[in-house]
Image (cartoon, rainbow, N blue to C red):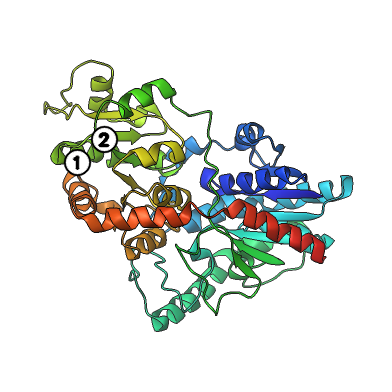
Amino acid sequence: MTILLTSIGSHGDIHPYVGVGQALRRRGHEVALLANPYFKRVADDAGLEFIPVGEYLDLKDINKRPELMGSFTGTKRILQDLIIPEAPNFFRTLEQLFKSRRVDAVFTHQICFGSAWACHKHGIPCAVGSLAPIGWPNVDDPTHFTPLTKRDPSPRAMRWWLKLAKYGSMLSYDPALNKARKELGLPQDRNMLLPAITGGDINLALWSRHFRAPIPSDIKHGHICGFVWFDRHKEQEHPSAELESFLNTGDPPIIFTLGTTAVHVAGPFYQAAADACKLLGRRGLLLTGERKYAPESVLRDTDGGSAVSSNGARCWPQVAAFTYAPFSSVLPRGCATVHHGGIGTTAQSMRAGRPTVIVPFAHDQFDNAARARRLGVSATVPRNKISPTSLAAALRQVLDTPDPTRRAAALAQQLNSERGDEEAADRIEQLIKSR
């Protein structure tokens, strides 16, 4: 069978589809990934056929558009400026593929709108993937939508927020979505965003039941499959010898990372991280995406030069900066992880069995942070409160008492027994057979 995977966004949006694609390939299916040309290397290294869609977009360019990671308007800006304008490109690319080859099913990201439209027009079975629990809004599931909402809203508050989300999304996104549909010759529609993210012939949640369990009032065609653990990124992996040397020469460090997107708008995060390690007297490992994002004092010390910061203060010498390393191999070797709350990083951090501190920047990250906190494995520091003292205080909260460490280890044991890629592959095969 031939199955097309379509996704849009950052590595956290692409990696789960690559993982599911590999599971399908192991079963003998022909699989192709459709995504921005930026991700060709990721698909090639994973052994998947790659079909580019749209113009090349380098994630580093987000530092020119910091509003895309804004706590209040970041999601709106990304959808209006980057995601919805790509809908016609995905639609047209899929139409051409439907004409040139037999396609048995499409597995698409929930905001890859053009893919679902093309499947609906041509009668191709369509599975929609949802990466984070915020993608299954439910009055019976406390969801932390923005920094302004309560972390644990009541069902009454959830009804209010979902109603607000419905009408707000209609005002914000219907005009842009209808403009794209008009360009494709499709009929105009209304209230498109929320039905799209919970749409498809089946809707596959790629998170663990231990992170967000099924609820009787969930969508009937939804299935919670589990996390997908693919996390390779060879273009940015730091030489393993240097990384291994640091990890092997002392106590397990605190690991600080902002994934592959928030890292480009890190602000004071990494300097505060280095200073927090000094306050705690602990080693620190900074995964900075690019060398230039590391604090200058840390780079000088790592290179064997002065360990004195630009303001003349002595820098803590037990902090090292690296560009990137696969989370699955590095995070279990730390004592705690401090990160931004992207769903991919959140999953890998919980799988590592170490407590976390989450500093949410935008999008689903506030909700992911609230869920990790409710599980007793994490503390939260607001983005506008980043400082050496706030990070140090949160780290003491999760490291100086045994409960977070114990719970994190127990949760990791549960997560490691799951295979979200195989469960998703099962569901996609069942969808094809049923049609």
Q: Nearer the viewer, residue 260 or 147?
A: 260
Cβ–Cβ under 8 Å for marks 2 and 1 = yes
Give percent across and percent down for residue 360. 36, 54
Q: Is residue 404 left or right of residue 280?
A: right
Residue 153, by quadrant, is bottom left
Q: Nearer the viewer, mark 2 or mark 1?
A: 2
Q: Nearer the viewer, residue 187 or 202?
A: 202
| Residue on which the image places disc 2 | 284
Residue type, numbered disc 2: Gly
Q: Nearer the viewer, residue 122 or 170?
A: 122
Q: Is residue 152 left or right of residue 304?
A: right
N-term-proximal mark, 2 vs 1: 1
Instruction: Determine the residue positioned at 55% across, 49% down.
Output: 13
Give percent across and percent down for residue 434. 80, 66
Extreme-bottom residue of the structure? 156
The image shows residue 144, relative to residue 89, as above or below, that is: below
Residue type, numbered disc 1: Ala
Q: Work out whether residue 114 can be spotted.
A: no
Q: Is residue 6 left or right of residue 325?
A: right
| Residue on which the image places disc 1 | 276
